[in-house]
Amino acid sequence: MNRSRGRKLTVLVLGAFGLAGALTLAAVAAPSRRARAATTYTPTDPSQIVAIVPARAPDEIAARRALAASPEHVELAVTLARADLARYRTLSDPRYLGRAQATLAPWWTQADPPSDVLLLRATIAQSTHAFGPARADLDRLVRRDPSNLQAHLTRAVVATITADYAAARESCAALASTSALLAVTCEAPLDGIAGRAAEAYARLSSVSPHGRADARVRGWALTALAELAIQLGDFDAARGHLRDALALDSEDSYARNLLADILMATGRMADASSLLAERDQIDSHLVRRAIAEHALHGPDADKLVGAMRDRIAAAAARGDRIHLREEARFALAVDGDATLALELATDNWHVQKELADARLLAEAAAAAGTSAAEVTAWVRATGVRDVWLEQALAKVTP
C-alpha cells in the first residue's frame, strides 16, 4: 500500500503512504494475479441490514442540492470533493473517492480545468496509484502557479514514490520559503534514500518537530524521523517518535502501521495486535492485525484472516491494484505462498519504489529462493543504507 507517503498541513490534502503519506483515489486495472474467488452474498430477508453508512449532515445535503441546481458552481463542487477525500483518508472507504470524482464530473475530462480541480484530479489519480496521470496534472499545475504549495508537496510525493528524485527535490525546495520544517521534512526521505540517513536525522531533529508548527506538519516530521531511525536500526527512537506522532493525531494510520511494523519485527506480536484493535475497517490495519493474530494463534485469527481474504477478493473483482503491498505481505506471512508473494511484490515494485516496497520484494525473493536483482540494482544506484533491507538482502539467493 498504497499513501498514503508530505502529509498533513491545514491546506494540504495529505494521506497515508510514502514520504510519510500522500493523497489518493479512483481505480485502475490490476496486473495479472491469482485472484481468490469471492462468494457473492445475496440477502433473502428484505429487512436484513447488510451495511450501515454514515448519515449525511444537513449542510452537506443542502450543498449537494445547491450543486444539482447550479452544476457549473466549481467552488462548491471542490468543497464537496475535498470533504469526501477527507472521509476517505479517515475511513479508508473507496466509495468516497468515487463520490469525489463524480462531484467533479463536469470538469473531469477537461484538458485545462481550474487549478483546484487539477489538484484534486491529481490527488485522486495518486490515490489509485495512477502516478503517470497524477504527475502530468501536477507538472501542469506548478507551471501555471509556481507558488502553489500544495501542488509542490503532492508533486514531491509522487516523484519520490516513482523514483524521480531530482523532481522531488525541486518541489521540496519550493517549500523552503514558506516553512523550513516543511522543506526539511520533504527532503528527509530523499536524503535517506541517497544514503545520508544519519545526516537527515540530525538535520530534521534540529528544526524541532515539537515546536510551534501546525500539529499535522509536526506529526509528519515525527514520522519522517521515525523512518530515518529505522533505517539506522534505532528502533527505540523510532517507537518514541511514532508514539509522539500518535499523541498529536490518534487517527494517523501511517504512523500506527509503522509502529505496528516495528513491534512485529521485534517479536511483539501481541502489542502490535493491541495497537490495531478495533480498527479493522482500514485494510492496512487489518492485514497487519491478521498477520499478528495468525502468528499468535489468537482467538480472532481465523476471523481476521477470513476478513482479509474477502477484502483481497473484492479488490481483485474491482480490478483494484492499490493494495498489492498488503496482498504480498499476507501471502507471505499467512499463506506461506512465496511464489504468489514474489509475483505481487514485483508488480507492486513496478508501480512504486519506496523502502517498504524494496524490503518486501527482497523478503519475498529470499522466501522464494530467487534473486532480487531489481532491488539490488536500485540499492546500487541510490546508495541507500537500511538495516531492514540489508537483513532481507543477506538472505537472497545470489
Image: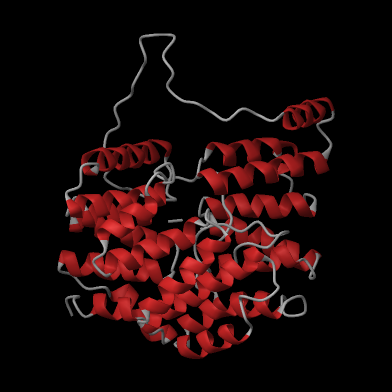
Left or right of residue 72: residue 308: left
Residue in front for this viewpoint, 85 or 70: 85
Residue beneath the point at 26% across and 64% down: 268
Answer left or right for 264 relative to 257: left
Name the spot of residue 74 as percent of width and height, x first.
Answer: 81, 41
Residue 297, compared with residue 353, is above or below; it is above
The quarter of the rendered structure image containing the N terminus is bottom left
Say left or right for 398 vs 273: left
Judged left or right of residue 304, residue 45 is right
Estimate the x, y position of residue 46 in percent, counting from the top left. 43, 8
Picture coordinates of residue 60, whole percent (x, y): 73, 32
Please state the horizontal and vertical placement of residue 158, each as a whole percent of the image.
57, 65
Rendered residue at 77%/75% (across/down): 178
* Image quadrant assignment for residue 181: bottom right
Residue drawn at x 41%, y 64% as measured from the top left: 258
In this view of the protein, which residue sits in the foreground, 274 or 384? 274
* 233 is higher (above) or lower (below) than 136: below
